[in-house]
Image: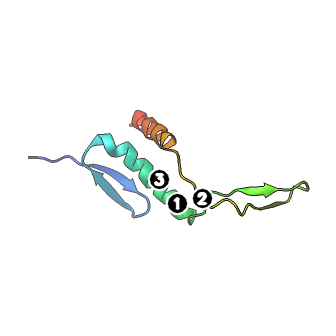
Amino acid sequence: MIDIKHGVYNCLTGQYDFVESKDVVASKIVENALALYFFQTNGHHYYCANINEQGHEYENGEESFGTEIPVEVLDAYVNKTNENL
């Protein structure tokens, strides 16, 4: 019996991540892309600044550097990736 696996390139490892079904290829691409993005931004992928009347920017101490990506946004990108496959 011949098994078919689908490889999705992982930029962080330089290797292919193999998945069992083409149905999960798009979500794996998004997962790998986000992992690379979070790695490259060193956990500082979001910044919120206050701008005063003189136009000077300073860090907003109430905001954190992290933020959750809404599920519907991720789903939209997975669907778009599926359309391109």
Of marks 3 and 1, the one in the foreground: 1
Type of colouring = rainbow
Q: Seen from this angle, which residue lies furthest top?
A: 83
Q: Earlier in the sequence, mark 3 or mark 1?
A: 3
Residue at disc 3, secondary structure: helix
Residue at disc 1, secondary structure: helix
For the point 43% across and 54% down, the residue is 32
Image coordinates for residue 5, horizontal then vertical, percent? 23, 48
Image position of 18 with respect to 41: above or below: above
The residue that disc 3 covers is: 33
Identity, as a three-letter code, of the amino acid under mark 2: His
**Which of the numbered marks, if any, corresponds to residue 82?**
none
Identity, as a three-letter code, of the amino acid under mark 1: Phe
Q: Earlier in the sequence, mark 2 or mark 3?
A: 3
Q: Which image quarter holds the C terminus?
A: top left
Assess whether mark 2 and mark 1 are in contact (beta carbons under 8 angstroms).
Answer: yes
The residue that disc 1 covers is: 38
Residue at disc 2, secondary structure: loop
- Distance between mark 2 and mark 3 Cα atoms: 13 Å
The residue that disc 2 covers is: 45
Q: Seen from this angle, which residue lies furthest front?
A: 62
Q: Is residue 78 left or right of residue 20?
A: right
